[in-house]
Each structure stands twice: as structure tokens, then as C-alpha cells.
Image (tube, rainbow, N blue to C red):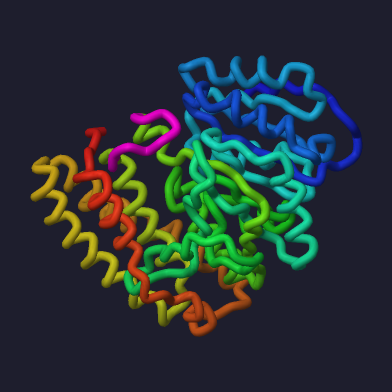
């Protein structure tokens, strides 16, 4: 890893913004431009961590941040994945808070100021802004409200409302106090990508902290930019890949096996049963056995292969646990996670799956 940095003020930044990038050259100009326009620009640090992008993203970021005393580019020599790439960047950060930001986002000018004011006023250590669609101000997500019967994240209603607690902060715009992030060990590198914000948020609540949605802080997010690029700033179809479904399915099982203390482990066999039903449905719709094998069978077997990691993580979490499964039951929601996917299919048509 090489580090190209311009020295700025010696004062500690209020927040270090970490943008993990892979082949995101098309999104960086608007994203970085919105950071330059922040009302608290003189109190932030910007780190673009590039996962060895072949599209020249690192050079684009360096050019866009030329002359910034508070911006730098980290160039990794290989693709570390979302989790370890962010962890590596966080190790070099100096801010009081860390703000993990996707490259396919842009922030309204007072977003960071309002977000920081919200966490300090409410006395919490984790927060997320309201997530709007990339090209307009319609609401995309208000974070995760809890988990459903199968242990999958149940989304919060898409509404503005008042500042309130959420179970899962937005993965594309995750603000966390630096000390808490380090105490919890950061993102779990075994996840590689997908489900990482769900896992981190569950650990945050276990450890006795809380997460906050600050609707007055507004951020625009494209979403699924790497696996579903068609449509530019708009998502026009339901598209995924064998690998995305593999990581998503494996990691949803992994986070339950890690984070559930005793009672909530009952969701594990229910989730496996759901995956078996989805595999059958996928075989009917996709008509490709390699998809079912990679996305479902391999995902379950890979989770079993991580049993040593799971046991180690359970021991670590036992040392910081302040909320039991009985207390975590307050986040149980009847709203099924998969209902959102069904709605997307009804709106945009059957899913298109890329092999590999």
C-alpha cells in the first residue's frame, strides 16, 4: 500500500470521511465535489482508499483533491474487499468520528454539520443521514428498523419524521465514533463485502451503544452501482450476480451465528429453510444450476467453514456484551425483509443475474 498525502492543520478533524473505491471513477467528481462544499469542510479529513481499481480511479481522486490540505489517496496493491479496505483506511484516520461513505453518493451542503450536531445533542456514538435517491429528493432508505422472523434486516418506514434511534445505520453513509469502532474491531474482514453494516450495527447495540437517524442531514445515493450499472443515476432493473448473492446469503447467516447469544439462534434454522426455498425459486426463474450452487449451497458450506472464526467472535462479543438476546428482542419486526425484494420484482420485472 502506498500513501500519498498533503499535510494540513495539526488540529484533530471532527470527522474522517473514508471513501472505499473500486472502479468508481464515474461517481467521484460529484461525491468529492459535495464534500468540498460542506459547511464544515475545514473540520474534516477526506481519505479515498482505492482497491487497486483498473479504471484509473485513484488518479481521478488525486486530481480532484489536488490542493486539498485535508485530503489524501490510499492506493492498495490488491482488492481488499469492502470490510478490510475500510479497516485499513480507518487505521490511518485521525478524526473524532469516522464516516464511511460510498462513492456513488453526494451530500447536501449542511449534511455533515447537521449529522454531527445530532449525535452530540443526543449523546450517541453512531448515526446515519436520511438517504435519498441519487437524482431527486425521494426517500430511498431510513435505515434498518430491526430484524424479521428469519433474522434478516427489516427496513424502517421511508419517512422523514424526527431524529430517532434505528437498529442499523445506512451502509453507504455510516458515522461512528472512532474509539467505539476500534473497540469493536471494525468491520469483520471475514465478510469481505455485503451485510457488513448490519453486523457492525448489531455489535454496537450488543455493546450498549445506540444508532441514530438524523433526517435533517440529507444524502443522495445511487445504490447497487457496481452490480447494476444500467440507468446511470437511476436503477431501472433488478440485477444481481452469483457472487453478490453468495456473500449476502453467507454473511446473513454468519452475523446471526456470531451475534445471537442463545434465544435468537433459533432464527438460524429458519433462515436456512428460507434459503432452501429461495434456491428452488431461483432455479425455476434463473434456470441455471451454477447460480443455485454458488449463491446458496456454497454460501451455507462457506459459513460452516468459518466456524472457528465464529467461535472467536462470540468470545470477543461476550467480553463487551451489555444487551442480552431478551433485550435485543425489542428489535423484532413482523415486516418481512423479502417483501421489499418482491416489490422490486413487481415494479422492475424478474431479476437478471450475472454469472461469476
Q: Residue furthest right?
A: 10
Residue 235 is a magenta residue: yes
Q: Residue at x 45, y 48 (%)?
A: 190
Report the side of 307 relative to 282 (left or right).
right
Determine the main secondary structure of the stretch shown in magenta: loop
User: Is residue 39 in sight in this rendering?
Assistant: yes
Indicate the quadrant containing the N terminus: top left, top right, bottom left or bottom right: top right
The image shows residue 29, relative to residue 338, as above or below, that is: above
Tell me the residue at 32%/54% (across/down).
249
Q: Is residue 194 left or right of residue 238?
A: right
How far across and how far down the image is residue 260, in percent?
Answer: 45, 72
> In the rendered structure, does residue 340 fall within the stretch colored magenta?
no
Q: Which residues are magenta?
A: 230-239
The quarter of the displayed image where residue 340 is located: bottom left
- Tell me residue 5's x, y (percent): 75, 23
The quarter of the displayed image where residue 16 is located: top right
Q: Position of residue 228 (x, y in %)?
A: 35, 35
As drawn, the residue found furthest toward the bottom would be: 326
Query: Toward the viewer: 202 or 220?
Result: 220
Amino acid at each position: 500500500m502506498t500513501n500519498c498525502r498533503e499535510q494540513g492543520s495539526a488540529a484533530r478533524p471532527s470527522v474522517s470521511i473514508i471513501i472505499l473505491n473500486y472502479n468508481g471513477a464515474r461517481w467521484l467528481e460529484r461525491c468529492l465535489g459535495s464534500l468540498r462544499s460542506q459547511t464544515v469542510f475545514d473540520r474534516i479529513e477526506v481519505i479515498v482508499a482505492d482497491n487497486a481499481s483498473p479504471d484509473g480511479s485513484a488518479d481521478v481522486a488525486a486530481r480532484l483533491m489536488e490542493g486539498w490540505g485535508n485530503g489524501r489517496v490510499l492506493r492498495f496493491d490488491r482488492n481488499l474487499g469492502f470490510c478490510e479496505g475500510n479497516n485499513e483506511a480507518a487505521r490511518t484516520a485521525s478524526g473524532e468520528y469516522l464516516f464511511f461513505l460510498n462513492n456513488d453518493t453526494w451530500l447536501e451542503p449542511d449534511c455533515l454539520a447537521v449529522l454531527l450536531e445530532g449525535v452530540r445533542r443526543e449523546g450517541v456514538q453512531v448515526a446515519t443521514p436520511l438517504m435519498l435517491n441519487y437524482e431527486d429528493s425521494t426517500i430511498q432508505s431510513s435505515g434498518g428498523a430491526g430484524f424479521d422472523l428469519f433474522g434478516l434486516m427489516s427496513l424502517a418506514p421511508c419517512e422523514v419524521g424526527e431524529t430517532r434511534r434505528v437498529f442499523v445505520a445506512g451502509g453507504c453513509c455510516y458515522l461512528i465514533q472512532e474509539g467505539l469502532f476500534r473497540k469493536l474491531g471494525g468491520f469483520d474482514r471475514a465478510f469481505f463485502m455485503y451485510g457488513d453494516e448490519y453486523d457492525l450495527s448489531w455489535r454496537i447495540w450488543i455493546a450498549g451503544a445506540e444508532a441514530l437517524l438524523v433526517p435533517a442531514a440529507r444524502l443522495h445515493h445511487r445504490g447497487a452501482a457496481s452490480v447494476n450499472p444500467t440507468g446511470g443515476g437511476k436503477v431501472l432493473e433488478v440485477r444481481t450476480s452469483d457472487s453478490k448473492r453468495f456473500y449476502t446469503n453467507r454473511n446473513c447467516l454468519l452475523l446471526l451465528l456470531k451475534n445471537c447469544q442463545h434465544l435468537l439462534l433459533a432464527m438460524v434454522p429458519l433462515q436456512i429453510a428460507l434459503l432452501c426455498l429461495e434456491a428452488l425459486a431461483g432455479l425455476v426463474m434463473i434456470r441455471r444450476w451454477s447460480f443455485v450452487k454458488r449463491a446458496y449451497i456454497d454460501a451455507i458450506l462457506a459459513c460452516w467453514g468459518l466456524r472457528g472464526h465464529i467461535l472467536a467472535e462470540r468470545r470477543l462479543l461476550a467480553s463487551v456484551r451489555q444487551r442480552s438476546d431478551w433485550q435485543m428482542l425489542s428489535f423484532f419486526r413482523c415486516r418481512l425483509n423479502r417483501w421489499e425484494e418482491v416489490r422490486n420484482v413487481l415494479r422492475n420485472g424478474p431479476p437478471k443475474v450475472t454469472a461469476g
